[in-house]
Image (tube, helix red, strand yellow):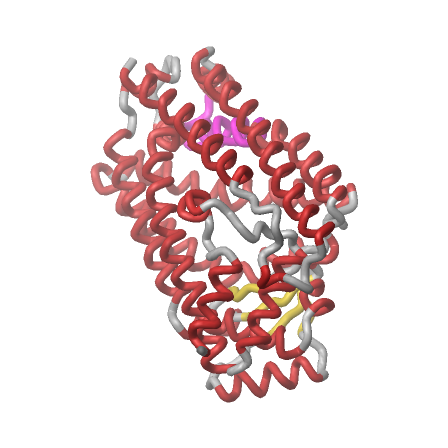
Amino acid sequence: MVFLIIILTILIGEYLLNLIVDTKNVRYLKTDLPEEFSGYYDREKYRKSQEYLKENTRFGLITDSIATPVTIAFILLGGFNLVDQFARSFHLGMIPTGLIFAGVLMLASQIVAIPFSIYSTFVIEEKYGFNKTTPRTFVLDILKAWVLTAVIGGILFSAVLWFFKEAGPWAWAYCWIAVTLFQIFLLFVAPVVIMPIFNKFTPLEDGELRAAIEEYAKKQDFKLKGVFTMDGSRRSTKSNAFFTGFGRFRRIVLFDTLIEKQTADELVSVLAHEMGHYKKKHILKSIVISILTTGLMFYILSIFMNNRELFAAFRMQHISIYASLFFFGFLYAPIEIVLSIFGNILSRRHEYEADGYAVATYRKPQSMITALKKLSVDNLSNLTPHPLKVFLTYSHPPVLERIRAIRRLVD
């Protein structure tokens, strides 16, 4: 009974927290356009950006308002037990039974999520001029994601089940090591194996932009393993850039939509920012933190493994390792929220440092500022988010704060 109360409190508390924060965020909107964006936003487009935020927020709250009661009902009515009985009906070993149990739950949740994803993509994103996804691409993306989840997730899930079944009290440590090694492996191969499944990556063609990038990289003693354009325009008009991979698989990726809308100096500024993350060892730090938090998660999981009271809360007839992994996820949610807050604080600090690196090394702060403004306008970003929303969920500082920080660097 105690575990049931804790779990229901966590579910309802998380829902109410999101409701309060998102409501505050919408009410915090400023009707007057910030002076910094004068000439970039006109009155109509600024109004459109705020309507985009409101509509996404409403839709998110409606989705949560459906998902939370359904999850609670599924727990109280013994839904997990029904799935477990189905998985056990095949009379297979523990690992195959666990894979069936996990597969049914995850497939069901994915199917339930499809109508919401359709509405978000083909109604909201379409309404505000972002959507370029065709029904065929939408369906293929879902099927590809399912196959990858089944293969990669199935391998990891099976390994975790085997260790907890066979490795005794140190099983959590073996799981930690195995998952960490697998994650590091994916960091190397994802850019050349997994990401191309969804998008086409093309080496940046010769020209003014490539020459400017190569000249800048040479000055920074940064050995380029590849600068690529990604066909982001297949799915959306939104633009972005990112750094991915390690070693000979290291690459910087620019969305084709970004290249269309930015000048060479602005694009090099964006690239310098991404390079700053590498030079400042932000990526390495994030990986180390991820490894440590994964170890913490597995250790706490080992404490609650096969807990009879926890299984009673979910109306389960049988205790199992595979179901323990799912039930632990409900208990771990508050810890995950706290860790994500600290992670976002660190991430925002890293963004400031990467901006500073770009300004200090490329020495064209106005180009960096202009690039940030164009990105914000093109993506209809919220210029004035509520501080609580930023504190809890923003991995990047609000754009106005980034611009002010850049101006302080050059004043």
Residue in the image at 71% along x and 82% along y: 206
Span of residues in magenta: 89-108
Which residue is the extreme one toward the left? 169
109 magenta-colored: no
319 or 259, nearer to the observer: 259
Location of residue 335 with respect to 293 vertically, above or below: above
Whether residue 369 is visible: yes
Residue in the image at 44% along x and 27% along y: 16
Whether residue 90 is visible: no
Which residue is the extreme one toward the top? 77
Image quarter of residue 118: top right
61 or 176, nearer to the observer: 61
In the drawing, does residue 163 fall left or right of residue 239?
A: left
Q: Main secondary structure of the magenta part?
A: helix
In the drawing, does residue 307 fall left or right of residue 43?
A: left
Task: Where is residue 217? Give x, y as percent.
Answer: 53, 83
Residue in the image at 66% along x and 41% along y: 51
Location of residue 205 with respect to 146 vertically, above or below: below
Task: Where is residue 284? Give x, y as percent.
Answer: 38, 65
Residue in the image at 61% along x and 27% along y: 112
In the drawing, does residue 195 fall left or right of residue 44?
A: left
Task: Where is residue 194? Give x, y as percent.
Answer: 58, 56
Quadrant housing the C terminus:
bottom left
300 or 64, nearer to the observer: 64
Task: Where is residue 127? Give x, y as percent.
Answer: 76, 42
351 or 134, nearer to the observer: 351
Quadrant housing the N terminus:
top left
Total marks in image: 0
93 magenta-colored: yes
